[in-house]
């Protein structure tokens, strides 16, 4: 059993974890509060881009009759080649099969669809000896072809670093997002929910905290929270992060709290510590309990509680970021365009550092 489960919902980056949960886990360690963190985004990507799941993708596309474009038809006709090469491609992008680079660079290893039509001059971009980078670029185009197929035939909201982002951009009005959540879960949703519920069943946490840094994480956070409410109604669910800090500061729609019990703002260490403390109360009075920058709903009315007089922790008091639990050897080094500066963002795993509390929330759920 864990006190807290920290989740980054799909999707952020393929090559490195967003650091919010690692910072918060490090802080909780200093308070002897047990926690476990999950980058659900990378876990869903690894599950989706497996031979088993990709076979299902092709099957569903054919069954539903969604293969319409010439590009999708070509990919479907080459499905056996995609199935044969998807797992070697993922292993190569993990850095676990570097010798595969030579075969990839022959341009005879992967099936090629529309992403390869606009390919740049590879010799100019990578030189005659930049074989690893050239192969990463080709493997990335291979995955992007498959992403295009998924978007066209399975789920138009899919994206490697965002999911249903347009719904996050319209979050000042909850109607569209709420309506989408009343629909049946998509295939991507089903994978996310399956992986998440399995984690919860193993860990049995008292509190689940979703870090939602960007609009492209919002829909999945709500979809996952809905499933938790259905399967584990006794578990309390909180949301925080950069998106909440900027877009939900004046939240008033009580329907949001059909999915989340609490929404916290800004530095998350103290708000989450107080949430954990509240769970030890046999019967909590939300009006009198001293929370920190926390929204909740009572009697169909959204309430904001910032009654705690305790000051936020200073940086020297929050401990060291803890990256344990994350699949650090399973992130994907991708090169989307043949531009060395751009590749700094997506090629190789690196730890993001705190520059300023509000810019990169040094805290926690940001």
Image: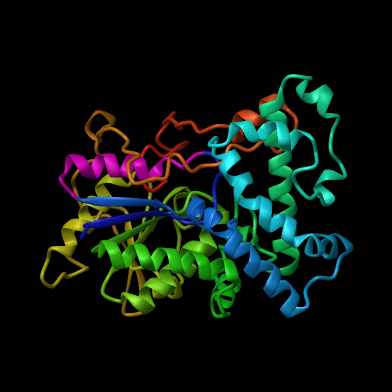
Number of marks drawn: 0
Residue 321 in sight here: yes
Q: At which x and y percent is residue 79?
A: 74, 61
Position of the N terminus, as image quadrant, is bottom left
Q: Quadrant of residue 154?
A: bottom right
Closer to the camera in the image, 27 or 83: 83
Residue 24 lies, with reference to residue 227, above or below; the image says above
Asked if the magenta segment contains residue 324, the reply would be: no
Residue drawn at x 63%, y 45% as measured from the top left = 89
Q: At which x and y percent is residue 170?
A: 61, 62
Residue drawn at x 85%, y 61% as measured from the top left = 74
Q: Is residue 207 left or right of residue 226?
A: left
What color scheme is it?
rainbow
Closer to the camera in the image, 296 or 4: 4
Q: At which x and y percent is residue 83?
A: 67, 58
Residue 167 in sight here: no
Residue 258 lies, with reference to residue 348, above or below; the image says below
User: Majority secondary structure of the magenta segment?
Assistant: helix
Residues drawn in magenta: 16-33
Closer to the camera in the image, 6 or 107: 107
Closer to the camera in the image, 231 or 333: 333
Q: Is residue 135 left or right of residue 272?
A: right
Residue 253 lies, with reference to residue 341, above or below; the image says below
Q: At which x and y percent is residue 127?
A: 78, 20
Q: Quadrant of residue 278?
A: bottom left
Residue drawn at x 27%, y 55% as measured from the top left = 306
């Amino acid at each position: 059993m864990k006190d807290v489960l920290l989740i980054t919902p799909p999707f952020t980056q393929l090559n490195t974890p967003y650091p919010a949960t690692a910072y918060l886990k490090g802080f909780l360690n200093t308070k002897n509060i047990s926690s476990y963190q999950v980058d659900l985004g990378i876990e869903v990507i690894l599950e989706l881009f497996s031979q088993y799941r990709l076979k299902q993708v092709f099957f569903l596309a054919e069954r539903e009759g969604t293969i319409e474009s010439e590009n999708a038809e070509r990919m479907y006709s080459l499905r056996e080649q995609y199935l044969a090469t998807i797992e070697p491609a993922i292993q190569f992008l993990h850095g676990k099969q570097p010798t595969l680079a030579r075969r990839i660079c022959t341009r005879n290893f992967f099936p090629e669809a529309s992403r390869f039509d606009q390919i740049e001059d590879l010799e100019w971009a990578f030189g005659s000896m930049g074989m690893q980078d050239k192969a990463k670029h080709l493997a990335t185009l291979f995955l992007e072809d498959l992403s295009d197929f998924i978007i066209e035939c399975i789920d138009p909201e899919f994206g490697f670093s965002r999911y249903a982002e347009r719904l996050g951009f319209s979050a000042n009005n909850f109607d569209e997002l709420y309506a989408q959540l009343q629909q049946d879960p998509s295939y991507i949703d089903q994978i996310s929910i399956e992986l998440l519920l399995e984690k919860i069943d193993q860990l049995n946490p008292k509190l689940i905290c979703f870090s939602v840094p960007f609009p492209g994480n919002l829909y999945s956070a709500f979809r996952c929270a809905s499933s938790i409410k259905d399967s584990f109604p006794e578990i309390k669910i909180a949301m925080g992060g950069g998106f909440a800090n900027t877009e939900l500061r004046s939240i008033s729609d009580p329907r949001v709290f059909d999915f989340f019990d609490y929404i916290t703002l800004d530095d998350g260490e103290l708000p989450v510590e107080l949430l954990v403390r509240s769970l030890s109360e046999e019967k909590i009075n939300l009006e009198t309990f001293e929370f920190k920058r926390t929204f909740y709903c009572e009697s169909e009315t959204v309430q904001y509680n910032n009654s705690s007089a305790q000051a936020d922790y200073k940086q020297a008091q929050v401990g060291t970021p803890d990256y344990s639990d994350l699949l650090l050897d399973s992130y994907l080094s991708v090169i989307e365009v043949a531009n060395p500066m751009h590749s700094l963002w997506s090629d190789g795993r690196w730890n993001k550092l705190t520059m300023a509390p509000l810019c990169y929330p040094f805290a926690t759920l940001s």
